Image (spheres, grey):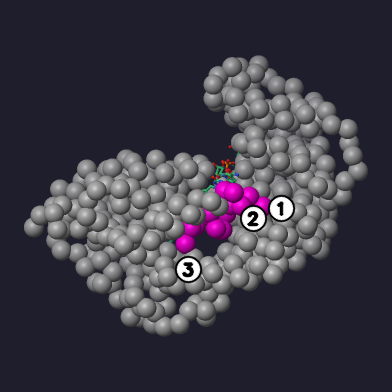
């Protein structure tokens, strides 16, 4: 048997997950110049992962990557199998038998926990569920957020925290013509949130916002930004960080915060308050969040390695809502080694390995399930290209046997009664969403349940 991916022996690959990293892996395979057949398997009927269900609705430019993914999906060597969950509807073992190799691009669907008392009280939410809810993710559409409260605390100072803050602080008119889910727009229209505290455990020079996202928080129609100038007095280590090329982004953030601090206070309906060097140690309340106890921190360590150290001093803040935005976390799929602490599939150069042990032949990872939950959409491209390079370097050692691909997997053919969603099916759903949005001046009105999406489709055509 010849090496797969040579002559008339096409390399058959399954990609698990239809987010950016999955599409960039498909693109790298298609560009390899080798004969390939790619089957992309996605648990939702809709492709695009966090570009559809993570990127904020008021940032439509960032969704332009979808045009690239659409071109990839239209390649004759590519097929999409939506509404199929790997590990549940089809096993990893079955995929390993049906394909020469499997690339996992399943992202980070869960979240880190704070690990403090009261974290699970009513009124305490994760950014993951709030973001999923306002973006119409089917898993989160039925969540209820208590927006009758006036004071909200967001723990974390990354770009997801900035997204959550903007959605809470914007007026409904600022959101009305975006693709925000209708249920979220209605709930936000009735929101009584007045103060949003965005709290970091380290100092302003260590906040992880990008400058554009931070600056935008100071440009909202009816929200004022509040920063205590005393919080912007930096220690020598932070100032030393600015000298470094890597410190340019942090320096920019501090400049923006200084500009916020110098602004005269203006009467606006909402306030965004930046707080630093505070770690939550307890969420207060009997049945519902009533406040948060923070421990004041100081920074410890040299430039670029400063960590937050508790001082023992406590500070109590009254608040009815808390959003934990401290990072996403990958989840396990049966049949794939999993590093539960990091929330990733352990890998070396994209090859999945047993933790601390040997390579698992034929299994690869890319994107957030490989690197952990950091990086913008574009970061996933070189990551996926590197994984595909490892796979192509391994061709001679892959099981060369003839592989049936989806034709050998009843679950992908819908034989178990499941309505498997093809790319043409998705295009029909996409078109229906765009049509629903048009009368409201929205780019689309998303379907937020799997049943609604499947209800639009007739019998499968493959
Ligand atoms: C809230 C938020 C906002 C963001 N905003 C921006 C932004 O504005 N600009 C920017 O550049 N970056 C942004 N990012 C970062 C960007 O979204 C990520 O870098 C990128 O989506 C990661 O790609 P991925 O393919 O690894 O994972 P994902 O995009 O999460 O895709 C994973 C896919 O795998 C599917 N899947 C999971 N498990 C299974 C399974 N068992 N079987 C089948 N399918 C499965 C999921 O349904 C999903 O479609 C944002 C991230 C978040 C969390
Ligand atoms: N517009 C955009 O481009 C956009 C939008 C959204 C997301 N993204 C990208 O998506 C990725 C994920 O974003 P993210 O905001 O989830 O992650 P992030 O950038 O890693 O930020 C996480 C924040 O949580 C804090 N944190 C972590 N553990 C904590 C704890 N136990 N207690 C208190 N605070 C804690 C971190 O503080 P420390 O620094 O001290 O750890 C940090 O401030 C990032 O790369 C981001 O840039 C981009």
* Residue 176 position by quadrant: bottom right
Residue at the location (35% across, 43% down)? 385
Give the foreground label among 3 and 1.
Answer: 3
Name the one closer to the observer, 321 or 36: 36
Q: x, y percentage for residue 158?
A: 62, 41
- The verdict on residue 60 being magenta is yes
Above or below, 383 relative to 97: above
214 magenta-colored: no
In the picture of the structure, the residue carrying the numbered disc 1 is: 167
The residue carrying mark 3 is 427
Q: Residues within 10 Å of mark 2 (few under 14, many from 20)?
A: many
Q: Is residue 222 left or right of residue 94?
A: right
Nearest-to-viewer mark from 1 and 2: 2
Q: Secondary structure at mark 1?
A: helix
Stretch of the chain drawn in magenta: 47-62
Label 1 crowd (10 A; few <14 / some 14-19 / many >=20): many
Give the Cα separation between the discs numbered 2 and 3.
20 Å
Q: Residue furthest right?
A: 267
CA–CA distance between discs 1 and 2?
9 Å
Q: Quadrant of residue 315?
A: top right
């Amino acid at each position: 048997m010849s090496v797969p991916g040579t002559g008339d022996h096409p390399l058959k690959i399954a990609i698990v997950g239809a987010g950016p990293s999955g599409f960039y892996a498909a693109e790298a395979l298609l560009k390899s110049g080798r004969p390939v057949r790619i089957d992309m398997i996605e648990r939702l009927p809709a492709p695009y992962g966090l570009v559809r269900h993570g990127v904020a609705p008021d940032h439509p430019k960032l969704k332009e990557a979808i045009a690239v993914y659409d071109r990839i999906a239209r390649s004759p060597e590519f097929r999409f199998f939506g509404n199929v969950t790997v590990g549940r509807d089809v096993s990893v073992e079955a995929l390993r038998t049906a394909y020469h190799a499997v690339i996992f691009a399943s992202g980070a669907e869960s979240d880190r926990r704070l690990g403090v008392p009261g974290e699970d009280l009513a009124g305490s939410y994760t950014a993951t569920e709030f973001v999923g809810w306002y973006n119409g993710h089917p898993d989160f559409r039925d969540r209820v957020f208590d927006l009758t409260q006036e004071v909200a605390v967001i723990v974390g100072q990354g770009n997801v925290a900035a997204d959550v803050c903007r959605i809470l602080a914007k007026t409904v008119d600022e959101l009305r013509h975006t693709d925000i889910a209708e249920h979220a727009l209605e709930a936000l229209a009735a929101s009584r949130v007045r103060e949003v505290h965005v709290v970091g455990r380290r100092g302003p020079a260590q906040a992880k916002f990008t400058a554009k996202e931070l600056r935008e928080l100071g440009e909202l129609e009816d929200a004022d930004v509040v920063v205590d100038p005393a919080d912007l007095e930096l220690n020598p280590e932070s100032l030393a960080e600015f000298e470094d090329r890597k410190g340019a982004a942090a320096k920019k953030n501090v400049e923006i915060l200084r500009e916020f601090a110098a602004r005269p206070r203006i009467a606006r309906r909402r306030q965004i308050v930046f707080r630093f060097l505070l770690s939550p140690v307890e969420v207060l309340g009997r049945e519902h969040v009533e406040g948060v106890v923070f421990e004041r921190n100081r920074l410890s360590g040299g430039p670029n390695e400063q960590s937050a150290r508790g001082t023992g001093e406590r500070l109590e803040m009254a608040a009815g809502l808390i959003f934990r935005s401290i990072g996403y976390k990958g989840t396990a799929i049966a049949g794939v080694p999993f590093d539960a602490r990091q929330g990733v599939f352990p890998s070396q150069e994209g090859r999945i390995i047993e933790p601390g042990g040997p390579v698992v032949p034929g299994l690869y990872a890319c994107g957030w399930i490989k690197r952990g939950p950091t990086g913008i959409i574009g970061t996933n491209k070189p990551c996926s290209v590197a994984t595909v390079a490892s796979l192509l370097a391994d061709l001679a050692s892959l099981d060369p046997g003839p592989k049936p691909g989806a034709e050998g997997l009843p679950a992908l053919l819908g034989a178990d009664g499941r309505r498997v969603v093809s790319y043409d099916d998705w295009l029909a759903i996409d078109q229906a969403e765009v049509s629903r949005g048009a009368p409201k001046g929205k780019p689309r009105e998303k379907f937020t349940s799997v049943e609604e999406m499947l209800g639009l489709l007739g019998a499968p055509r493959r």
